Image (cartoon, grey):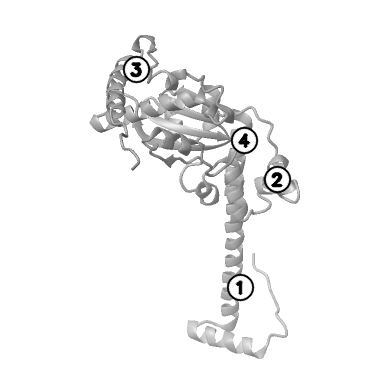
Amino acid sequence: MFGRLTIRNLKIEILDRLNEFASTNERSVEAEVRYALARWTESSSSKINVDEQYRKNISERLIFLMQQKNNFLNSSLKASHVAERLGCAKGSIVDQWISGEVEPTFEELDKLADYFSANPKWLKHGEGSPFNKKYERIPEQPQEAIKWLLKEERYRDLKKIVFIRCSSGSIYLVKIYNNERTIVYTTPYVLDNSVGNGGFNAMIKLFIFWEELYKQYTKIFDSFGLSATNIMIASYIFNNTDSKKLEDGDIDPLALLEKNMPEPWWEDVWGNDDSNLREYWSGCKEFCAEVNKYKLAKMANQSQYVDTSVDC
């Protein structure tokens, strides 16, 4: 269908320019006007579509994050709760972001990612996985390692530390904070007899750290000890399916912890009495007994070096 359009009171300069364009493009002034109007309306329509698509993408990602909290964690989180915790002036704004009516700014998206412990690049641009991980090598000195565990990073109010052994033997560490926020770390440690010499030596140091951590954790009468912080420490063993979900970062790590039962392997594997060691996974007792043998030798060797200097 075609229609007619009459345009009055055009400035002479505009008409002159239209005549120039028409002459250059070898078409009539009327054809040039039709071409210009078509390009203008297509450009405006394209811009609207781009804006709508971006709001739609953000909406879908926010719905996914809300579902993670509510479906997997048995939560009753509402958009107004999120708005209140983000410090928004009104409770309806997050609802408008989720519905795709209003586009949040990058600063607001960063705050949302922080609130949901999500990957900000994924939330803003769709890049990477929803829940990313940080690579971390735990400090070798036990006391330094404990300080690192307790230091403030992305969040404050640490309430739980979780060690996870995946089906491959890889060790993950999750710090859980108030308001169910998390930081997930992937480590170079492999708790499995498939490791080489370097990995075996790393496990010796990790066992020494776990032993010291346990001592600090169970110091009941030490007001400055780890037990005084009320921070809980737990450990889990993930099967192949949950290990892959954790590694891929496609699901809230708290949802994976919620569906699994804790196993106290972190406080057992370094024990010096191998007769009490449980077979938490295939080959666990044999491998841990071997690590403990070398751990005891290393600790005995370190204890020989005593500072005998005197003040002059």
Q: Are the two marked residues, 3 and 2, in contact with CB atoms closer than 8 angstroms?
A: no
Residue 232 lies, in percent from the top left, at: 55, 26
Q: Is residue 220 left or right of residue 136?
A: right
Q: Please tell me how crowded label 2 is: few (under 14), some (14-19), or many (20+) other residues with Cα within 10 Å.
A: some
Question: In 3D space, how far apart are the residues under numbered discs 3 and 2 (Cα atoms)?
Answer: 47 Å
Residue 56 visible, this angle: no
Please state which amino acid type lies under the numbered disc 2.
Ala
Q: Which residue is mark 2?
A: 83
Q: Are the two marked residues, 4 and 2, in contact with CB atoms closer than 8 angstroms?
A: no
Which disc is residue 284 wearing? 3
Question: In 3D space, how far apart are the residues under numbered discs 4 and 2 (Cα atoms)?
Answer: 17 Å
Q: Are the two marked residues, 4 and 1, in contact with CB atoms closer than 8 angstroms?
A: no
Please state which amino acid type lies under the numbered disc 1.
Leu
Along the polypeptide, which appears first: circle 3 or circle 1? Answer: 1
Question: In 3D space, how far apart are the residues under numbered discs 2 and 1 (Cα atoms)?
Answer: 43 Å
Question: In 3D space, how far apart are the residues under numbered discs 4 and 3 (Cα atoms)?
Answer: 34 Å
Along the polypeptide, which appears first: circle 2 or circle 1? Answer: 1
Residue 5 lies, in percent from the top left, at: 69, 75
What residue is at 49 percent from the left and 85 percent from the top? 24
Q: Are the two marked residues, 3 and 1, in contact with CB atoms closer than 8 angstroms?
A: no
Along the polypeptide, which appears first: circle 4 or circle 3? Answer: 4
Assign a secondary structure to mark 2: helix
Residue 274 visible, this angle: yes
Q: Is residue 9 left or right of residue 57?
A: right
Please state which amino acid type lies under the numbered disc 3.
Cys
Which disc is residue 178 wearing? 4
Nearer mark to the viewer, of 2 and 1:
2
What residue is at 40 percent from the left and 16 percent from the top? 280
Please state which amino acid type lies under the numbered disc 4.
Asn
